[in-house]
Amino acid sequence: MSVVETRAPSVFPGATLTQITLDADRRRHGPYTLAADLLGLLVPEAAPELIAAHDIEILAAAPGLRASVPVGRVSMVDRLPQDERILVPGRLRTLRLANGLAEFVRDHLRARGPLAIHVLNAHEADPTDTELVAVLRRRVPADLLTIALEPPDPAFVLPGPSGVPVRDVDLDRYRDEGFHHAMAEAGAALLPTLAEDGEEWWRLLHRTTTALAALDREEEARALLDHARRVSAHPKHRATAAYATAMLLVRHHNPGERDPEEAMAWINEAVALTSLLPDRRERAFHLGFDLNGKALIEVRRGNAEVALRLVQRAIELAERDLEPGRHPVHKAVLRANRAQLTALMGDAEGALSDLDAVIAADPGYADPYLDRGNLLHRLGRLEEALADYETAMRVGPPFPEPYYNRSEIRYARGDLAGALADLDHAIELDPGFTDAYVNRAGLLVALDELDRARADAERDLDNPYLLCVLGQVEAAQGKRVKARKAYDSALRRDPRLAAVWAGRGALAFEEGDHETSIADLTRAIELEESAEALFNRSLALRMAGRSERARADLRRARELAPDDEEVRRALAELG
């Protein structure tokens, strides 16, 4: 680490600006080379409670600080051997880590004083550090932190060609933390040095293809798997390769490239091979894994009931043939998947029972709290849902979904300011979270903050939901032609959006075209019945002289919204 500290005048009264120089070259220490050096400077002087609030993120980026950072938030996975860690973090894991690290740096600098960082060799940084720098710049105020990327210095060159690790790589860390770029890079460098078809080669190949898939590089992953099939006849490894190929086909990042039918052919090969494994415990684990994958394919084919039976079979295998206490993550994943499927089939209580068991087995893992909160939300058990969302916020690195989901409950309760704050925070955590922009834009329309709503809606004019909001903005500003154009564009992209038909129906009513208004609102009600659409159609029906139908709409609206004063007054007027 290259660190040079100087003091300069600061905007903080009585404080001075610290300037440091850090070397980001990933060939020194791999992922989070820059972050580890920065944390090495900041953590020793940070408040214990701040360290505790970000222990997961700090240790993921700087494992060398383990002796000085107490581990408070622990998941069951952290205590398992490598062969039982079946969950590989998704590609957004590092964004969660970066957000947690940015919050640590921000809150520490508020107490400590401002910092200026000069970064050397940013062009050789691992993507984890590149992402972290972007998040730090976005989330830490400029009066607290400035980051300058220095131009490359040709006099400073590490040995070894660019892009090839020259250090001892920690492949377990890459896999466990979701450092997919580093794993893919290490795989490309190390696979040619290993004996093909050996256990070490297969282990690295599977880890490399998993990383490539997470990076949307499915074609490269498929090429490696096809090569592995050409050089090996090992049944277990070929079965795992068949499973991986099936998952590439059913999960491809480009929906147009997904092929559930070919995926089914590959997963059946995996099932056939693993069914023949002689050791019942090994067979139960690998076959359960394959049956779970086959269930996903059946879901994509629209066969949820078949998928549920497959997951149930996998659970029965695990309960019967796996040793007690072994493979707890595998068992938890199966129960979580059964919960999703039973909820889909209408068995909410059965789904809750499974999710309760999953959380009881690993109370330090955030995702099941989110799933259970969503189910409780749908059941109307809002206080319990809020508790789960807020637990998900605490037990792991920050991610946007709990805030997004809490905003819906706050909105339904009339807490528009709280809902907006949650949506703002969700977008701060992930500026690419489109659904949060959709909800925030709609909320801003309700708050009459039309300029902000327009800015959100115009982020993606191919998104039908945002086009719908744009139509609402144009209508609210009296631009009826533009409003209709936005609604029509939304319907061309998704003709099943009830809100668009309702908006277009309201627009037609304002223009005095009552028959078109009735037709559009009728379509909206067919797609998604709501008191608001029924009320609006009743107005159009009254103007068209159809009082009895208007009265029927108002009665139904009163059933859906018994406390709505507008509905009550309209019914009283009709008698």
Image (tube, rainbow, N blue to C red):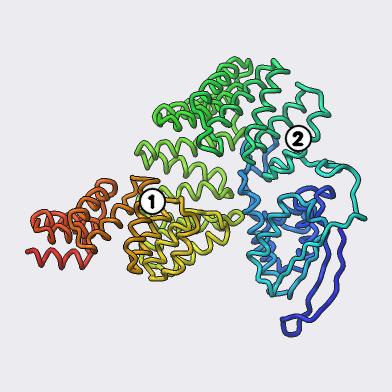
Identify residue type, mark 2: Gly
In what quadrant of the picture does the C terminus appear? bottom left
Q: Within 10 Å of the Cα at label 1, are there few (<14), some (14-19), or many (20+) other Cα atoms?
A: many
Q: Within 10 Å of the Cα at label 2, are there few (<14), some (14-19), or many (20+) other Cα atoms?
A: many
Residue that mark 1 sits on: 489
The quadrant in which residue 450 appears is bottom left
Looking at the picture, how far across and down is residue 84, in whole percent?
Answer: 65, 34
Residue at image point 58% right, 21% down? 270
Residue 67 visible, this orientation: no
The quadrant in which residue 164 appears is top right
**Residue 558 in the figure: left or right of residue 296:** left
For residue 12, above or below residue 87: below
Q: CA distance from mark 2 to mark 1?
A: 45 Å
**What mark, if any, has residue 187 been given in the picture?**
2
Which of disc 1 and disc 2 is earlier in sequence?
2
Identify residue type, mark 1: Ser
